[in-house]
Amino acid sequence: MSDVIGAVQEVFYALFQGYCLQYFMEAFLESRFAKQKWSGFMAAILFGVIKIGLRLRPPSNDASVEILKKQIALFLILFVLTFCFYQAFHIITVFLVITFMAVSEISFFLAYLVMEFGSLLFEFWNWCVGQAYITSVETFEYVIKGTMIGLYILMYLSFCVIFYFALKKIVKSYREKDYVIHRTELLFILTPGLVGWLICLLLRIIIITVENGILNFWYDKYPVLLLIVLAILLLSLLSIVYGVKLFQDMIYFNREKNSRIILENQIGSMQEHMTEMERIFSGIRSMKHDMKNTLSVIMQLSAGNEEKEQEELQDYLSELNQTMDRLEFQFRTGNAVIDTLLNMKYHEAIKAIPDIRMDAEWLLFSESLLIQSYDIGIILGNALDNAIEACRKLKEKEPEAETFIRLSSVQKGNMILIEIENSFDGTVIRKRQSEFPVTDKADKEAHGIGFSNIKKAAENYHGAVDWSVDHKVFLLSVMLQNEKSRGG
């Protein structure tokens, strides 16, 4: 009976490792196959079967060499499986494979130590026999076998819990999965896993020794080593998990710093430009008003001239009047700063795409708007930059395609919804762990922060950002509360 239970536990142990493998790899790597779930399932089953095969391999004369061979074989098998089932031609793959092996080995030995501490029950049963609490030999054998089975089950359950939650913590801590890792950074996050794996390899080699044909366990000779090894394994596991977290925090804070600098420069430049544009356009409006009055007088006075001269004068003045009309703002939202921004972006758009249509008729802001103009400017500025770029790419691929950008806003109670809709080529690059579409530009660290800046501006007003795609139309929605910024 115990042999059957042991065999079942071994199969479960191997298959569970296979499941954890596909969970861990899929969190970082894209599947090579369209049916990702099936490919992950096949990878898990195949790894489990190979793991069982390695355990059933007959032992050699030199146990330490055999242990080393199995570990190297398992390491190579993991690499092969990863490359077969995932798009793993990345430097991060080395970290994934070694970390997976290290966490697996550390989890196994931690679970093994849990069982060893549980073996103190055997001394308790012997004490019970000595105190005559257990008098039957059959009862004693039954209790011993039950305890053995229970401890093995406890060991495998402990392994599953430690292994799964350690991997889950690493996956959760590794937030910047699109970050292109450099070699020195790889060494930083790889070292804890490599050290942990080598510690476990050492334990596998020295845990059992043979003296005079008798098997001896190192913890029988030095019981205190149980506590020392337990502390080493726990520290090793924590160094892997929190080493990843520290690395990700460093990336996050560095990216936040760069993004903040860009955002501050963008805000400062926008405020200066808008102030200047407001001053210029204010002067133009005043001049236009005066000029229209002057032209009206001139046109009346010219009515008494000769017919030919009168026609020439009328044509000239009419053309001059149209020129003045063109100085009028293309967009009127009720907010002078936003009007200026929209006109700037409109001229940028038609310069890149002459036949683009930009409609902001339903983008309106009331006088009771509490949201600061430059925050709306950050949202609209970044959204329009993305939309113009998307339209430009569409035009490059399909010169006859219709390109457009539509902006609108709706206010209900204290909530304001801003929507930016634009045409694009229909291609969206997105990874499962990414909240927004991924930039297809080569320098991913310098680009693709537009959505991030929009989200930050929205969060200052307890807002949120969402996006959707309908064929070749991209819709960005930004919800804000009409209140003063919580960011100051």
Image (cartoon, helix red, strand yellow):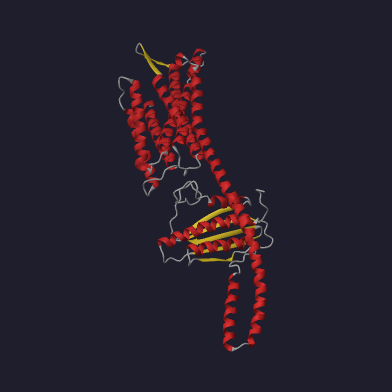
Vertical comparison of 395 with 320: above or below:
above
- Write down the quadrant of residue 381 in the picture: bottom right
- Write down the quadrant of residue 290 in the picture: bottom right
Q: Observer-nearest residue: 302 or 99?
A: 302
Residue at 59% in and 60% down: 341
Residue 351, given in percent of the width and then of the height, sits at 50, 63
Q: Position of 478 compared to 71: left or right?
A: right
Q: Observer-nearest residue: 325 or 449?
A: 325
Residue 359 seen by the camera: yes
Residue at 53% in and 52% down: 450
Residue 338, given in percent of the width and then of the height, sits at 61, 61
Residue 68, given in percent of the width and then of the height, sits at 35, 25
Residue 204, given in percent of the width and then of the height, sits at 40, 23
Instruction: Give the total of numbered labels.
Output: 0
Q: Observer-nearest residue: 15 or 257?
A: 257
Residue 335 seen by the camera: no
Vertical comparison of 422 with 228: above or below:
below
Q: Find the residue positioned furthest to the top.
A: 212
Residue at 41% in and 22% down: 202
Q: Observer-nearest residue: 440 or 343?
A: 343
Vertical comparison of 132 with 433: above or below:
above
Quarter holding the N terminus is top left
